[in-house]
């Protein structure tokens, strides 16, 4: 069984991941000229903001604090959102969508790691599962948009 401190650190890690996603989507919305993509990106940015709020509530419930309002530096896997910045400079929607797919896949991998540790995360497993499902749905939507742009 993990200590409460380790559980709080896991949740803080997820806050950083969803904040990276929020920032990535906001940057993507600013970079694209497509009104449709702007709308989609802002929808997912708002979703990630909500996810961060929910995770922070669980951190507080475990006696921790999470002041993190931006992306994290805890690991390279979720910093793949930084690749969006390179894609944004090209202003090519396909490149932006490709970068988002990479970021979403990394986020899902991390969520699945914590969900698999059911015993330690039992009191917030429903939250983690619901958020992971939301990220999967976003990923599917982004992939669908990417396929229409690439066709």
Image: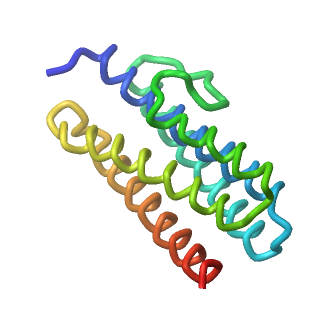
Residue 128 rendering spot, x and y as whole percentages:
36, 47
- In the displayed structure, 22 sits above or below 68; it is below
- Residue 124 vs residue 31, the one in the foreground: 31
Q: Position of residue 135 (x, y in %)?
A: 46, 58
What residue do we see at 20% from left, 19% from top?
2
Q: Residue at x 51, y 58 (%)?
A: 101
Q: In the rendered view, would you say 44 is above or below 16?
A: below
Q: Is residue 10 above or below residue 31?
A: above
| Quarter occupied by residue 96 | bottom right
Q: Nearer the viewer, residue 2 or 16?
A: 16
Q: Position of residue 118 (x, y in %)?
A: 18, 40
> In the shown orientation, is residue 117 left or right of residue 27?
left
Percent from the top left, x then y, of residue 83? Answer: 62, 43
Above or below 129: residue 141 = below
Q: Quadrant of the C terminus?
A: bottom right
Q: Quadrant of the N terminus?
A: top left
Going 28% across and 38% down the picture, which residue do you hit? 114
Position of 18 with respect to 137 (left or right) is: right
Q: Nearer the viewer, residue 82 or 14?
A: 82
Q: How is the structure coloured here?
A: rainbow
- Tell me where residue 72 sits by quadrant: top right
């Amino acid at each position: 069984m993990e200590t409460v401190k380790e559980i709080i650190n896991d949740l803080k890690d997820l806050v950083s991941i969803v904040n990276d996603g929020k920032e990535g989507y906001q940057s993507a919305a600013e970079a694209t000229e497509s009104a449709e993509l702007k709308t989609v990106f802002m929808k997912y940015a708002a979703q990630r903001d909500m996810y961060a709020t929910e995770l922070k509530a669980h951190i507080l419930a475990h006696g921790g604090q999470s002041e993190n309002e931006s992306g994290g530096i805890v690991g390279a896997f979720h910093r793949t959102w930084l690749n969006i910045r390179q894609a944004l400079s090209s202003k090519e929607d396909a490149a932006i969508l490709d970068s988002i797919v990479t970021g979403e896949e990394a986020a899902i991998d991390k969520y699945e790691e914590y969900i698999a540790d059911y015993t330690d995360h039992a009191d917030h497993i429903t939250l983690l599962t619901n958020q992971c499902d939301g990220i999967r749905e976003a990923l599917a939507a982004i992939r669908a948009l990417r396929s229409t742009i690439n066709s």
